[in-house]
Image: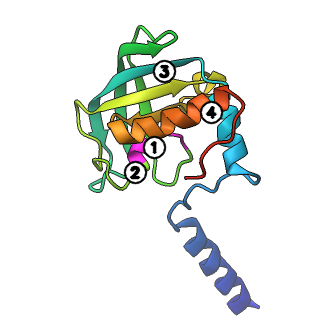
Amino acid sequence: MKTGALIIATMLATLSAAPTLACTPAPGDQVAARTRDLHAVTSVYEAQVENVVLHDQYGDNLDFTIRPTMAIWGPKPSEPFRLSFEAGACTNWFFLMDDQSDSPPRNGLKVIVMANPDGLADNRWLYVLRADADYIDSFMSDWRAARANQSLSRH
């Protein structure tokens, strides 16, 4: 009996020391969810990443400031705000997950922020994109399609 309890205790200790699992999207149609999010966008603005603080040597856990610099559509926040990212966290911060992005992000990096009510209530759900013309064009075409109640591309 003691051996069984020892095995269970060892398994529990191993599981509690396991790394954080990657974000798992909510069940359902992800394109439909993205369409709803984009349809609800209330502002689009350019911003700059500043004050990057790495909490590990890989840049998987970090804090940074988003300083809004220019309104594109709708209002932009008047004050900078801080974002924190932990490995495996679910966010809409696409510039952190993009294969072509700077990893970790560097101070001075330009990004585009698309705010919707969910993102304003919880910054994890702000859409933050790298300020690359092709990438923005693709994302903005999805935003325009969502606003016109048309189908989004499936990328």
- Separation of marks 4 and 2 at Cα, in angstroms: 22 Å
Asked if disc 4 and disc 1 are in contact, CB closer than 8 Å, the reply is no
Q: Quadrant of the N terminus?
A: bottom right
Tag nearer the camera, 3 or 4: 4
Q: In this view, does 8 lie above or below 127?
A: below
Residue beneath the point at 43% across and 31% down: 83
Which amino acid type corresponds to the residue marked 4 in the rendered image?
Ala
Q: Is residue 64 left or right of residue 83?
A: left
Mark 4 vs mark 1: which is more N-terminal? 1
In the picture of the structure, the residue carrying the numbered disc 3 is: 44
Label annotation for residue 145: 4
Residue at position x 69%, y 92% in the image: 3
Q: Nearer the viewer, mark 3 or mark 1?
A: 3
Helix, strand or loop at label 2? It is loop
Residue under numbered circle 2? 98
- Residue 99: which quarter of the image? bottom left
Q: Quadrant of residue 132?
A: top left
- Find residue 112 and report its horizontal and vertical position in percent: 40, 28
Q: How many angstroms separate mark 2 from mark 3 (CA)?
A: 20 Å
**Disc 2 residue type (three-letter):** Asp
Q: What stretch is highlighted in magenta?
A: 91-96
Name the residue at 37% across, 52% down: 60
